[in-house]
């Protein structure tokens, strides 16, 4: 793929679960925007396995709250120089939705935290980020957890 490494910051995908580690990863995305990345997609997946059983009736409320959170992130990125910032809030499996969107949007880099809010993180630390890194067709920058 000639020129691939030169172009890896054309379109950055930033999946977030709004955890402390995701905030740390967002600082890296802001730096990328300040250094010339113009197109970013902000993604928050409404995790079907966590919502379906007892919280599905609140999905609209969750979407509204998370849309507002992502709009604040978008504003920060535009202040840093990004000119095209999209927001996506799909419903499903976080790993599958991240990989699907990365392929559909022709993202060139995924930036994400290495460990989020997973309720079993002691057993499977960073399983979403590790699976994304394993299966993504584009480079993945995993920002390590805050220790």
Image (spheres, rainbow, N blue to C red):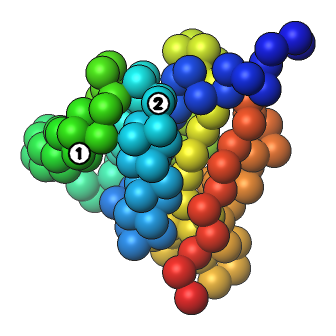
Q: Residue at x 49, y 54 (%)?
A: 28
Query: On the rendered structure, is 18 left or right of 32?
Result: left
Q: Is residue 67 visible?
A: no
Q: CA distance from mark 2 to mark 1?
A: 14 Å
Q: Is residue 37 left or right of residue 75?
A: right
Q: Is residue 124 left or right of residue 107?
A: right
Question: Seen from this angle, which residue lies furthest right?
Answer: 1
* Residue 133 % position (x, y): 75, 46
**Secondary element type, mark 2:** loop
User: Which residue lies at the image location 31% right of the left edge and 32% below the top edge?
Assistant: 81
Q: Looking at the image, is 122 positioned above or below residue 52? A: below
Q: Inspect this view and state whether residue 46 appears.
A: yes
Q: Up-down: is 143 above or below 35?
A: below
Nearer to me, 9 or 59:
9
Q: Quadrant of residue 76?
A: top left
> Is 46 positioned to the left or the right of 110 in the image?
left
Circle on res. 130: none
Dot label at residue 36: 2
x then y, percent, for residue 24: 45, 66
Q: Quadrant of residue 128?
A: bottom right
Mark 2, other Cα within 10 Å: few <14 / some 14–19 / many ≥20:
some
Q: What residue is drawn where x is 42% and y is 23%?
A: 39
Q: Which mark is residue 76?
A: 1
Q: Residues within 10 Å of mark 1 (few under 14, many from 20)?
A: some
Q: Nearer the viewer, mark 2 or mark 1?
A: 2
The quadrant in which the C terminus is found is: bottom right
Give the answer, above or below, for where 55 lies relative to 94: below
x and y, in percent, of residue 73 in the image: 25, 46
Which of the 4 image quarters holds residue 74?
A: top left
């Amino acid at each position: 793929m000639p020129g691939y490494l030169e172009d890896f910051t054309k379109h950055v995908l930033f999946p977030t679960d709004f955890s402390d580690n995701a905030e740390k990863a967002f600082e890296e995305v802001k730096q990328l925007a300040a250094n010339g990345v113009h197109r970013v997609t902000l993604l928050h997946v409404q995790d079907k396995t966590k919502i379906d059983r007892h919280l599905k009736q609140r999905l609209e409320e969750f979407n509204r709250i998370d849309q507002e959170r992502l709009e604040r992130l978008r504003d920060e990125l535009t202040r840093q120089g990004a000119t095209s910032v999209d927001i996506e809030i799909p419903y499903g499996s976080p790993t599958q939705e991240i990989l699907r969107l990365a392929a559909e949007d022709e993202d060139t880099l995924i930036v994400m935290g290495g460990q989020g809010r997973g309720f079993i993180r002691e057993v499977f630390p960073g399983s979403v980020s590790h699976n994304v890194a394993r299966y993504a067709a584009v480079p993945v920058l995993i920002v390590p957890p805050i220790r």
